[in-house]
Image (spheres, grey):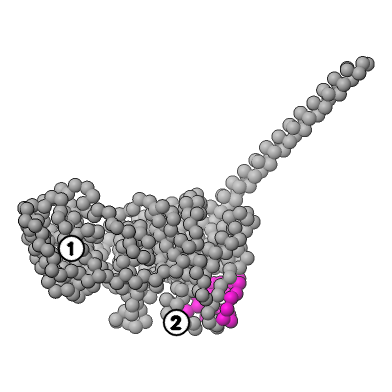
C-alpha cells in the first residue's frame, strides 16, 4: 500500500476519533448543563416552598393611602411564633407577639434604604377589635404591639397606614427561631457591646467588648431588655439596629452572594422562617434584592420613631411632632435626615379642580396654640370666594395641614387643599358637608387656588405657625455601636 494511501486512512481514523470525542464532550456538557438547570430549579422550588403565605386582602381597610409609584415600603415583623402556619386568614395569628416592627423604605431610585423601628410601647389610635370598617375618628388609643397580637399582619398594616398615611406594599413575618439559623449560616455575626450583659431571661451573658455571636447568642442579644440600660424598648431597638447593621456588613464583607454554599444555607434558614403576603414570593424578593444591590452600607439608614413619655402612663410612649416629619419625608420619598428637597406642586391640585370655592364650606381648626392663626387663614380663604368659613381651636398638636372631608366630598376637599402646599387629604365619615382644615406646626401660608373667585389680593400674614420639631436621629449601617 502506498504511503499516501496509509496517511489518508490514518487521517480519516483520527478525524473520526476527534469527532467522536467532540460528540461525547458535547453530550457530557449538555448533560452537565441539564443537571445544573435541574439542580437550580430544585433549589428555587425548595426555597420558594419554604415560605408560608397569607392572604390578608379581605382584612385590609378600604380607605388605604395612595400608592406611590417607585418607592417600596415593606413591613418587617419579628415574631416569637411561626405566624400564619396552617392559617388561611389573618385571624389565625391571634395571640402571636411582635417583638420587633420595622418599616423598610426603598427609595424610588433605589439609592437609599431607610429602616424605621416602631417602639412596641407606643400608644397610638388603633381599629377597635381590629375592625378596619370602623372610621379612623372612632379608633381608641391602644398599645402598638397589641395590633399584631389581636389581628395579625392585617391589623398591624391598618394601624400603621392609619397613623402614617404611608402605603405598605408588602409584609414579611420573621420567626425568631429561624433567625438563629440565618446567623449560623453566616458563620456568626460580630457585635460590640459597650457594657456587660447578664440577662437570665434572654439566656445571655457577655462581657463588654467585641464578640462573634452564634445564632442562639444573637437571639438573646436582640431580646435583651430589662437587665441592660434603662430597661425600655428603646434601648433594645438600638441593639437590634446595631445587629442588623452587623449582618449587612458581614454579608458584604464575606461576599455572601458569591458563595453558593453560604448563600443557600442563609436563604434556606431565612425562607423557612418567613410568612409573607401572597405577592411577595422568592421571585419578587430576588427582583427587590437586585434593585438595591448597589446600595452601599453608608446609604442604609436606621431610624427609630421619635417618641416622648405618654402622659397617662410613664411606662408607655407617644409619637412626637418629629414623627410626623419622619412620615412626611418618607411619603415624599425624601431623605429622613438633613434638609428636605423642595416640594413639587401640591398633589391636591395636580389635576384640574372641579368644585368652585363658592360651593365649599370650610372649618379652620387652629392646632398650633398660636393666637389669630385660624382667623388669618379664614380671611385668606374668604377673599378667594369660599362660601362659608368658620374657625375653632384644639389642644392637639399635629404637624402640617390636614384637610378632612366626608365620603363623597373629595373634590370639594381638593379645592380647599389647593390653598395649602403639601396638605394631607383624609376622609372622615363623621363629617358633614363642611370640609375641615386642621393647622399644625409648620403649616404654610395660604396660596391662591387655581379656580379662585374675585380679584382681591390675599392679605399678608401677620402670624405664622410654629416650626415643627424635626429632630430625627439616624445611624447608618457602617457605624459601630461602640464608636
Seen at 33% across and 53% down, the residue is 67
- Asked whether residue 241 is drawn in magenta, I would say no
Q: State the separation of the CA atoms marked 2 and 1.
A: 44 Å
Say which label, 2 or 1, has the lower sequence index: 2
**Which residue is disc 2 drawn over?**
231
Q: Residues within 10 Å of mark 2 (few under 14, many from 20)?
A: few
Residue 426 x, y percent position in the rendering: 23, 60
Residue 301 x, y percent position in the rendering: 44, 65
User: Is residue 30 left or right of 162 when viewed as pictured?
Assistant: right
- Most distant residue in the right direction: 1
276 is higher (above) or lower (below) than 233: above
228 is higher (above) or lower (below) than 350: below
Q: Nearer the viewer, residue 362 or 400?
A: 400
Residue 278 x, y percent position in the rendering: 44, 53
* Res. 215 image quadrant: bottom right
User: Is residue 66 left or right of 462 when viewed as pictured?
Assistant: right
Element type at mark 2 = loop
- Most distant residue in the top direction: 2
* Res. 101 image quadrant: bottom left
Element type at mark 1 = loop
**Which residue is disc 1 drawn over?**
445
Q: Residues within 10 Å of mark 1 (few under 14, many from 20)?
A: some
Q: Is there any visible trace of residue 139 in the rendered image?
A: yes
Residues at circles 2 and 1 in contact by the CB criterion of under 8 Å: no
* Res. 164 image quadrant: bottom left
The part of the chain drawn in magenta is 200-225
283 is higher (above) or lower (below) than 378: above
Disc 2 vs disc 1: which is toward the camera?
1
Seen at 24% across and 55% down, the residue is 346
User: Is residue 116 left or right of 216 when viewed as pictured?
Assistant: left
Q: Is there any visible trace of residue 52 in the rendered image?
A: no
Seen at 24% across and 63% down, the residue is 135
Amino acid at each position: 500500500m502506498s504511503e499516501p494511501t496509509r496517511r489518508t486512512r490514518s487521517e480519516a481514523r483520527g478525524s473520526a476519533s476527534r469527532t467522536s470525542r467532540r460528540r461525547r464532550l458535547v453530550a457530557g456538557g449538555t448533560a452537565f448543563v441539564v443537571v445544573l438547570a435541574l439542580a437550580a430549579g430544585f433549589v428555587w422550588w425548595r426555597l420558594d416552598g419554604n415560605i408560608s403565605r397569607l392572604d390578608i386582602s379581605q382584612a385590609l381597610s378600604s380607605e388605604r393611602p395612595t400608592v406611590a409609584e417607585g418607592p417600596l415600603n415593606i413591613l418587617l415583623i419579628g415574631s416569637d411564633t411561626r405566624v400564619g402556619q396552617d392559617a388561611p386568614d389573618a385571624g389565625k395569628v391571634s395571640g402571636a407577639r411582635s417583638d420587633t416592627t420595622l418599616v423598610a423604605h426603598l427609595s424610588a431610585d433605589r439609592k437609599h434604604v431607610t429602616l424605621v423601628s416602631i417602639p412596641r410601647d407606643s400608644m397610638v389610635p388603633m381599629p377597635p377589635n381590629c375592625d378596619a370598617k370602623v372610621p379612623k375618628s372612632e379608633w381608641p388609643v391602644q398599645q402598638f404591639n397589641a395590633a399584631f397580637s389581636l389581628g395579625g399582619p392585617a391589623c398591624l398594616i391598618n394601624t400603621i397606614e392609619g397613623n402614617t398615611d404611608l402605603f405598605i406594599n408588602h409584609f414579611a413575618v420573621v420567626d425568631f427561631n429561624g433567625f438563629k439559623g440565618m446567623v449560623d449560616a453566616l458563620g456568626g455575626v460580630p457585635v460590640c457591646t459597650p457594657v456587660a450583659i447578664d440577662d437570665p431571661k434572654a439566656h445571655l451573658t457577655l462581657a463588654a467588648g467585641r464578640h462573634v455571636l452564634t445564632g442562639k447568642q444573637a437571639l438573646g442579644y436582640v431580646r435583651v431588655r430589662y437587665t441592660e440600660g434603662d430597661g425600655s424598648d428603646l434601648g433594645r431597638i438600638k441593639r437590634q439596629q446595631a445587629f442588623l447593621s452587623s449582618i449587612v456588613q458581614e454579608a458584604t464583607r464575606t461576599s455572601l452572594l458569591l458563595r453558593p454554599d453560604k448563600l443557600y444555607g442563609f436563604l434556606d434558614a431565612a425562607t423557612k422562617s418567613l410568612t409573607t403576603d401572597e405577592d411577595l414570593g422568592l421571585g419578587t424578593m430576588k427582583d427587590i434584592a437586585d434593585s438595591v444591590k448597589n446600595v452601599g452600607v453608608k446609604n442604609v439608614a436606621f431610624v427609630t420613631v421619635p417618641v416622648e413619655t405618654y402622659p397617662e402612663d410613664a411606662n408607655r410612649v407617644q409619637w412626637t411632632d418629629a414623627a410626623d416629619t419622619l412620615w412626611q419625608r418618607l411619603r415624599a420619598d425624601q431623605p429622613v435626615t438633613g434638609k428636605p428637597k423642595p416640594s413639587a406642586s401640591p398633589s391636591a391640585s395636580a389635576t384640574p379642580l372641579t368644585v368652585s370655592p363658592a360651593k365649599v364650606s370650610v372649618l379652620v381648626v387652629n392646632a398650633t396654640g398660636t393666637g389669630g392663626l385660624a382667623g388669618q387663614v379664614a380671611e385668606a380663604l374668604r377673599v378667594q370666594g369660599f362660601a362659608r368659613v368658620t374657625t375653632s381651636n384644639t389642644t392637639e398638636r399635629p404637624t402640617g395641614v390636614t384637610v378632612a372631608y366626608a365620603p363623597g366630598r373629595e373634590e370639594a376637599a381638593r379645592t380647599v387643599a389647593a390653598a395649602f402646599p403639601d396638605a394631607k387629604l383624609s376622609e372622615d365619615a363623621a363629617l358633614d358637608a363642611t370640609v375641615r382644615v386642621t393647622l399644625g406646626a409648620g403649616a404654610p401660608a395660604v396660596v391662591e387656588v387655581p379656580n379662585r373667585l374675585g380679584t382681591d389680593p390675599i392679605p399678608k400674614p401677620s402670624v405664622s405657625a410654629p416650626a415643627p420639631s424635626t429632630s430625627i436621629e439616624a445611624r447608618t449601617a457602617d457605624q459601630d455601636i461602640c464608636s
